[in-house]
Image (tube, rainbow, N blue to C red):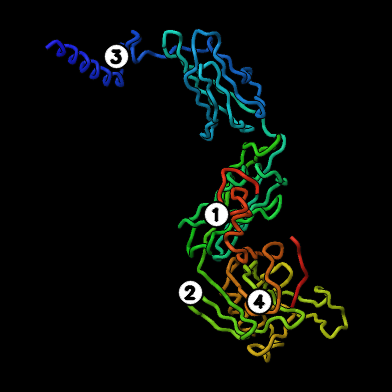
Amino acid sequence: MNDTPRIRTVLSCTLLAVTVTAGASACAGSDGHPLSARAYDAADQLAVNAPADGAKADPEKPLEITAKGEDGRITDVTATDEAGHHLAGELTADGQRWRSTAALAAGARYTVRVATEDEDGAPGARTYTFETAPAKRALTVTFGPEAGTYGVGQPITADLSLPVKDRKARAVVERALKVRSTPSVEGSWYWVDDKKLHFRPKEYWPSGARVTVTGNLDGLKVGDKLYGGASKPLKLTIGDRIEAVADAGSHYMTVRRNGEVINTIPVTTGKPGFSTRNGIKVILGKEYYVRMRGTSIGISEGSSESYDLPVYYATRVTWSGEYVHAAPWSVGSQGVANVSHGCVGMSTGNAAWFYETVRPGDIVRVVNSYGDTMDTFGNGFGDWNLPWEKWRTGSALVEATGSPVAATEKARLRPLAL
């Protein structure tokens, strides 16, 4: 019987507390302060090292907020920039000091909200805004290829404006480079050198995929006095899966669209001493007319191997000048023997069909040639010749063993061949 009045009091207080959200008075807490008491202005209790006179803060220095005296303490700090990124920080156990633990962004505007309480437990609050100075050195990134529709083998490229050698700095950069695909794919960046990265999926892109690439480097601290700059996003669409396999042994090329054979073409590939490179190549572009000369690959004029010919329907697969093209002068050898200086030659009609069927990013794979394997980098896109586990180790976010880590480090042109 004696408990009944106390229970009624608690229930009544609970009901009143719910009503507070609508603006009514609330029950008092155990310390006598109203639960909905308006926070007082805590400006006099706080010291902030951010400039208050309109000057810009040095992003190299951490943000610090200190409680003055022992009359109160800091209970919470939230610092965000205009993009909504939170600045990480640490509050001392006694609530006397908060200090940022992550680097401030350069050229950013921050809003800092500080919550406090006085010696009696009453809540206080204060909001600060300040700007950081712009970076003196900005690292920008340019994505490739140009926006458009590409084949399933097209890698994404990222060209940096400044070299990044430090392993931790590379990890910062790589985390900021985002590739999103619909449908989603498993993929990874690979550091080709200090200023270039390539991105490819584990398998070829799905046909019809939509790919968006963004660089979230703007204002981000990359390394010692080096910050990221703005970058232009990239959008790509992936077309049908076109794969051409040129068999140097059988002297035929088989072309498939989405797994189905759509053509089988008699071809000729590189003869001994000029053997076509084996492996997977990605179509770089198409040129209706190219003039090809033997001197461009070191053949002297007057030599029995010398040539100077107009070439039509030329589909480029290496920067050094390896093409799939029309070769009407070798029709008698196509499907029978290898007589070219490294290119895949076919009749004019077949070359025109191939030229009209494929697009940049489509796959041309050469098998059973006596040539070397296509270079991974430097002579076009040989990215797919690197096994996936080795590819992953080119990421700054993956150990040499292939295991992901939180943060670790991890073109040459050749002349034309006919």
Name the quadrant containing residue 105: top right
User: Which residue is found at the position 80% from the left and 77% from the top?
Assistant: 293
Q: Position of residue 396 (x, y in %)?
A: 62, 48
Camera-nearest residue between 70 and 325: 70
Any mark on residue 294, and which? none
Q: Position of residue 248 (x, y in %)?
A: 65, 82
Question: What amino acid is labelled 2 in the image?
Answer: Gly
Question: Taking 242 as reference, is 380 left or right?
Answer: right
Question: What amino acid is labelled 3 in the image?
Answer: Ala
Look at mark 4 in the image and give the residue it sits on.
Answer: 324
Look at mark 2 in the image and give the residue it sits on.
Answer: 259
User: Which residue is found at the position 72% from the left and 46% from the top?
Assistant: 163
Tag 2 secondary structure: loop
Question: What amino acid is labelled 4 in the image?
Answer: Val
Question: Taking 52 as reference, is 237 left or right?
Answer: left
- Extreme bottom residue here? 332
Quadrant the N terminus occupies: top left
Look at mark 1 in the image and give the residue it sits on.
Answer: 235
Tag 3 secondary structure: loop
| First in sequence: mark 2 vs mark 4 | 2
Look at mark 3 in the image and give the residue it sits on.
Answer: 26
Q: CA distance from mark 1 to mark 2?
A: 26 Å
Quadrant the C terminus occupies: bottom right
